[in-house]
């Protein structure tokens, strides 16, 4: 499936909510010959996906598949999600840790590596009215993006831990920070506070989050480099290629060579367009303080 079968638009959330979201994005997908496109979502932050057409089949690899829901909700992940997508339209909302803290009542670790039907899971009940509003709205990208903005603006609230969450997130995406001690020192907090804050708002331990960042830096560089060789893009924090291969398998449940041999009909096009419009190919590499203003062409 080529890029002509996928259209993505990225909308900047309101400035008042800077640091809460990766973006609001609208996706239209039309697999060739009326088929279904299959691909793997990479490890990412929490996501809300609202389908305005036919629904996908999705599964965390090795677990029971989820079918038939028009509101697919995921917590932060450190594993791949395999999906089969028919021709459809959808809105996505990527929740950065600050956004999770503001708009989710459940601690992130309780929903980490979980794929849920948002229409049924109690943790996502507050977003069901948004799901209904998007599905009932006229088919207009700008209008629907405004519905998303208005929904979250109406639920914005002050958060005592906001500055600490943003500081940890900023340090986490800095490739110069290589271990938990450096992460805590950069944020001027104790390692115990760092552990608690990461579990509640980021979903995982600081050590696991740093490992995920390292792997995602390498994976995104590979995907955007016309898949040259892994050794050309491997992150400098890996001790050797064997270390990288072990870590890649831990996060993606397959070897780097197995991943490279697969077609990526959705992710390759989506990542390239995301990098073009937002400057970042994957949401785990987004900086929390960056406010995006561009939208992709219609």
Image (spheres, grey):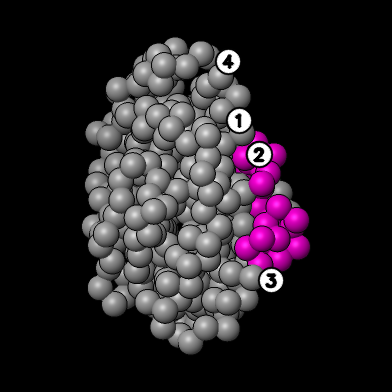
What residue is shown with label 4? 192
Q: Which region is colored magenta? A: 105-128
Q: Residue 147, relative to residue 34: is it above or below?
A: above
Q: Secondary structure at mark 2?
A: loop
Instruction: Find out whether the residues at labels 4 and 3 contact each other: C-beta distance under 8 Å.
Output: no
* Circle number at residue 293: none
What residue is shown with label 3? 68
Instruction: Find out whether the residues at labels 1 and 4 contact each other: C-beta distance under 8 Å.
Output: no
Gap between marks 2 and 3, in whole Å?
A: 26 Å
Rendering quarter of residue 234: top left
Instruction: Find out whether the residues at labels 2 and 3 contact each other: C-beta distance under 8 Å.
Output: no
Whole-percent x and y of residue 164? 46, 29
Q: Secondary structure at mark 1?
A: helix
Give the residue drawn at x 45%, y 65%.
Answer: 149
Gap between marks 4 and 3, in whole Å?
A: 41 Å
Whole-percent x and y of residue 214? 39, 30
Most foreground residue, 70 or 228: 70
Q: Residue 292, relative to residue 131: is it above or below?
A: above
Give the residue drawn at x 52%, y 83%.
Answer: 137
What residue is shown with label 2? 107
Most foreground residue, 135 or 259: 135
Instruction: Find out whether the residues at labels 2 and 1 contact each other: C-beta distance under 8 Å.
Output: yes
Gap between marks 2 and 1, in whole Å?
A: 8 Å
């Amino acid at each position: 499936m080529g890029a002509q079968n996928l259209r993505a638009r990225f909308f900047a959330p309101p400035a008042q909510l800077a640091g809460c979201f990766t973006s609001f994005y609208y996706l239209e997908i039309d697999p060739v010959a009326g088929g279904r496109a299959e691909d793997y979502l990479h490890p990412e932050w929490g996501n809300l996906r609202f389908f305005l057409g036919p629904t996908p089949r999705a599964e965390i690899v090795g677990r029971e598949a989820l079918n038939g829901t028009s509101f697919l909700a995921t917590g932060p992940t450190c594993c791949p999600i395999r999906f089969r997508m028919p021709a459809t339209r959808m809105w996505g909302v990527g929740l950065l840790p600050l956004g999770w803290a503001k708009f989710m009542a459940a601690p992130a670790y309780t929903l980490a590596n979980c794929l849920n039907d948002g229409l049924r899971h109690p943790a996502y009940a507050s977003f069901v009215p948004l799901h209904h509003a998007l599905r009932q709205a006229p088919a207009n990208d700008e209008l629907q993006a405004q519905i998303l903005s208005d929904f979250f603006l109406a639920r914005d609230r002050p958060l005592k831990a906001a500055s600490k969450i943003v500081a940890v997130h900023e340090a986490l995406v800095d490739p110069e920070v290589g271990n938990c001690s450096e992460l805590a020192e950069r944020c001027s907090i104790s390692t115990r506070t760092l552990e608690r804050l990461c579990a509640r708002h980021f979903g995982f331990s600081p050590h696991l989050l740093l490992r995920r960042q390292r792997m995602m830096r390498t994976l995104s560089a590979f995907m955007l480099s016309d898949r040259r060789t892994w050794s050309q893009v491997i992150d400098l924090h890996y001790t050797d290629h064997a270390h990288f291969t072990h870590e890649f398998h831990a996060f993606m449940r397959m070897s780097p060579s197995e991943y490279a041999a697969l077609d990526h009909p959705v992710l390759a096009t989506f990542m390239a367009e995301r990098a073009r419009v937002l400057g970042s190919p994957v949401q785990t590499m987004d900086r929390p303080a960056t406010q995006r203003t561009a939208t992709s062409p219609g």
